[in-house]
Amino acid sequence: MLLSLIIPCFNEEDVLKLFMERTSAVVKTIREKFGAETEYIFVDDGSSDTTLRILRDFHAENEAVHYISFSRNFGKEAAMYAGLKASAGDYTAIMDADLQDPPELLIQMMEILSENRADCAAARRMDRKGEPVIRSWFARRFYSIVNRSKDPDLVEGVRDYRMMNRQMVNAVLSISEYNRFSKGIFAWVGFRTEWIPYEHADRAAGKTKWSFRSLLHYGIDGLIGYTVKPLEIAAWLGLIFFGLSMIGILFIIVRKLAFGDPVAGWPSLVCIILFCSGIQLFCTGIIGEYLAKVYLEVKNRPVYIVQETDQMLQKL
Ligand code: UDP
Ligand code: MG
């Protein structure tokens, strides 16, 4: 039995040694308890620090360690995809390098999968403690909009930290789209998922790659990538305004017939024009977002470009 661990790394030189120490203890337990070997697949997502050098050293010391290095930063989604493609394990887990995903949970995940209680065991954050209020607010809005669609619901607080069996990994890999939103893909492919609630740990070292702005972008991309609900909202807005304008037209005709044509109402006219053109621009913007996604998708560019890997993975 083989467990593949996929670890996306972007400028993680401060934390990698620590990560290896804590994880190898867990790997040992997994070997004793389940008789499973573990392979590490580090994906260096175009780091500009010494991450790649550290990974080469890891590989030289331990043949269970593999690495893939991208030609530039392609983002965590691309890194996870590359890792999944390279993984050969019966079970595959994705975890962050910064130890915010406690490696000890792997044992629990392994239990769930090996007893076949589920096809996927995923960590779920139970609180948003220590997070700026406004960020939590946006996160909740995100889930409430996404989950109003017909697509499978996204569970709030899910992380990318999860272990899947081969069947589910293959299903995820069969989705080769360019605009990847893994949380959505994991939900979309289905299968039985068991949630493991856990307390979010602080980053062991180094700093987060996410600013508020990049998170907002991630949210919007996720929304657009996962559901077409915003297009529906735009269409409904159009319908509602069509209805309102009908009432307005009737009102004006009746007033004209009853009271003649006093030239008044310039301010209200300006308000209506400004308001309606605002809504129009907003809806055009939504359509534009989808068009942009379609454009990127039809260009059919690769999700990532590999610059260097170790011997074992070179056949990829
Ligand atoms: N990461 C990556 N590419 C990126 C950004 C992040 O591979 O462009 C990796 C990063 O090295 C880490 C994981 O994704 O292992 C999560 O990143 P981070 O800790 O910055 O995010 P947070 O935990 O704050 O959500
Ligand atoms: Mg983190």
Image (spheres, rainbow, N blue to C red):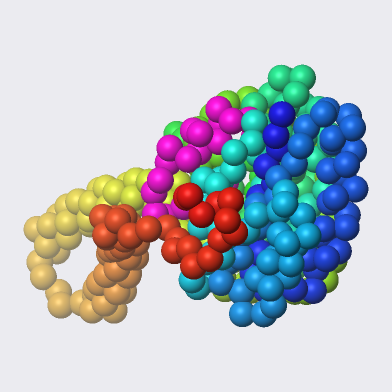
Q: Nearer the viewer, residue 58 or 176?
A: 58
Residue depicted at x 72% and y 52%: 63
| Position of residue 61 measured from the top left corner of the image (x, y, whole percent) | 78, 60
Q: Is residue 126 left or right of residue 310?
A: right
Where's the N terminus, which quadrant? top right
* Range of magenta residues: 163-183
Residue depicted at x 40% and y 46%: 176
Asked whether residue 165 is drawn in magenta, I would say yes
Q: Quadrant of residue 285?
A: bottom left
Residue depicted at x 68% and y 42%: 4
| Position of residue 205 measured from the top left corner of the image (x, y, whole percent) | 82, 71
| Position of residue 229 measured from the top left corner of the image (x, y, whole percent) | 40, 46
Looking at the image, how many numbered discs can be counted on the residues?
A: 0
Q: Nearer the viewer, residue 177 or 277?
A: 177
Q: Is residue 284 left or right of residue 263?
A: right
Q: Quadrant of residue 55?
A: bottom right
Q: Quadrant of residue 154?
A: top right
| Position of residue 11 measured from the top left corner of the image (x, y, whole percent) | 67, 73
Q: Nearer the viewer, residue 308 or 210?
A: 308
Asked whether residue 126 is drawn in magenta, I would say no
Vertical relation: 199 (above or below) 75: above
Vertical relation: 272 (above or below) 195: below
Residue depicted at x 55% and y 52%: 313
Q: Does residue 285 appear anywhere in the picture?
A: yes
Q: Does residue 129 appear anywhere in the picture?
A: no
